[in-house]
Amino acid sequence: MQSDPPAEPEPEAAMPDGDLFPAPALDTPTAPAGDPRAVLHDVFGYSDFRPGQAPVIEAALAGEPVLAIMPTGGGKSLCYQLPALVRDDLSVVVSPLIALMRDQVANLTAAGVPAGTVNSGNSPEENRRVLAALHNGELRVLYLSPERLLSDDMLGRLRNLKPGRIAIDEAHCVSQWGHDFRPDYLRLSALAEHLPDVPRMALTATADAATQRDIVDKLFSGQDAKVFISGFDRPNIRLSIQPKASVKSQVLAFVRRHKGAAGIVYCRSRKRVEDAAAALQAEGIPALAYHAGMPAEQRDANQDRFIAEDGLVMCATIAFGMGVDKPDIRFVCHHDLPGSIESYYQEIGRAGRDGDPAEALLLFGTDDIKLRRDLIESSEKSPEQKRIEHMRLNQLLALVETGDCRRQALLAYFGESRHEPCGNCDRCLSPVKREDGTIAAQKFLSAMVRTGQRFGAEHLIAILRGEMTERIGKLSHDRLPTFGVGKEHTKAEWRSIARQLMAADVIRADLEGHGSLVPGEHARAVLKGERKVGLVRDPKVATTARLRREAGMNGGDEPVLSDADQAVYERLRKLRAQMAAKRGVPPYVIFSNRTLREMATVRPAGLDAMGGLYGVGARKLEEFGPAFLKALDSD
């Protein structure tokens, strides 16, 4: 099966000269320096730090080298934003994508924090304005790409300005062992030479032990960096993994359950992206497409719409996502198997950043496994890198086929133990039966060996089930001793067995054999009875709706409000959308969904009461509070 290779994320120079976000209000008074908790409340409207934030911020304020690994939605950005306000100095932030930088600037500006970005997507006038504010000491947060930061011009400016810290976001991009390596990030090791007295921070949401070592080695140049790991768990995301049956129907059913919510459908190729978007559109679902083969103008327009509007579904390759800081994405669906657990974790982490319930569905089949192995072997990477990538793929397949709690298996990959099942994955909500599959595995291996290891799963399954196809008759495979010995299993069950045997490396796809299967590392031991094979019964595909009923979730959307509160909430959302459109920013820059729900349920009687709600800082209270109070009083 031919498919496009995974698309690379766009480099900085490829971004458009659009004006999705207005120029930052650089003349905004700087938030007063002082106590971190006071700044947290007064500027950002939060009553307390999220788990893991306080020690990272304390180390940053002390000027120590820091590596912080925090889950997506865990508040990484606050760890470099807050110190700049407390110390009344400058945080320079390295980010890989213009869209992400501009989104962060819009959020900070709305909160009253002087922030800016210099990049090729800005107009020359805007870049000059930001640089002038930088030299006048007005900025507290400056976002730059790696290339821009390491330019001679910018390094010279920063030497004179002496920023308080340099924060390297998405730091896993520096590691060649990671899932999202960016060569430009490797050059950041030169910061130790060019700006030796400026403390450095590295932050990421996903990094296994090898990637963590790589980050420390490349970004801290022998310094004894303090490493903070605040946990990888995202308990608000329901994890579900299903074998492919009718993929179009499975995706459609999943998206329909999240009607009116924003979501992402990841596909492995450009064609599949376009087909998935067209299929959803044909069912009346507002869906967009995003991949590197599209004209840049259309691709960027679709991304801007997804960020700014509610309820859109983005069908995309992995080129989409890192630059999108949208907190209210309610679901992520993998149409195809991702490349590794790191990729899977990073991609599902884009759902539910606001802490509300979200859901991740992964669909997979044997073709996915073969394609992933083909891509690894056909790459120009070193044998050692290929070995590691095969190992990581096998670890992903173990997650896919596990009969235990998905979250326990996922967290164990990152070295984090969870003693109790999560109760919020398909394995916990619908336990599967385990059985000794050694005999089934031996039958499958026997059919494979007796046919010369030249055929794929479907042909071998037909032999095992005793199906007299034209091809079997022509090859006289009906005369084999294994013909018909597997009638006790259905085709679907045999396909599941084949996937599990592939995941356990009992069988492998022959990279030169056009889909044929060959013995894996453990095949000989299984055939000789020296190794047992445990199999999980293939779960029913159509169980997700029942799981949702059992869990009492509201279609994967937000927590249920009373009818009266829901009416107020919708009125507030409409006002927020109008204000966001007028300012040219995404709705969540005004207020988050959580803030609007608190308004709808608490019904604050005045600005002082509204100022105590989640996410309502002083600047937002002053600028947006009166209009929202008026909307609350319109009953």
Image (cartoon, helix red, strand yellow):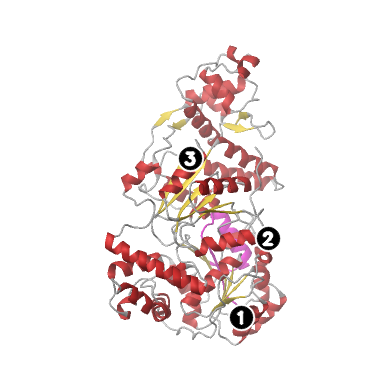
- Tag 1 secondary structure: helix
Could you tell which of marks 1 and 3 lies nearer the N-terminus? 1
The residue carrying mark 2 is 183
Left or right: residue 609 compared with residue 229: left
Image location of residue 524, percent across then percent down = 58, 26
Q: Which residues are magenta?
A: 197-225
**Residue at 56% from the left image edge and 31% from the top image edge:** 506
**Residue at 32% from the left image edge and 70% from the top image edge:** 599
Quarter of the image for residue 545 reads: top left
Q: Is residue 562 visible?
A: no
**Of marks 1 and 2, the one in the foreground:** 1
Give how far apart the Cα atoms at labels 2 and 3 are.
Answer: 39 Å
Pointer 1 with pointer 3, Cβ within 8 A: no
The residue carrying mark 3 is 249
Q: Residue extending furthest top?
A: 479
The residue carrying mark 1 is 130
- Tag 3 secondary structure: helix
- Tag 2 secondary structure: helix
Q: Is 93 a magenta residue?
A: no
**Of marks 1 and 3, the one in the foreground:** 3
Image location of residue 94, percent across then percent down = 60, 69
Q: Amino acid at mark 1?
A: Val
Q: Amino acid at mark 2?
A: Pro
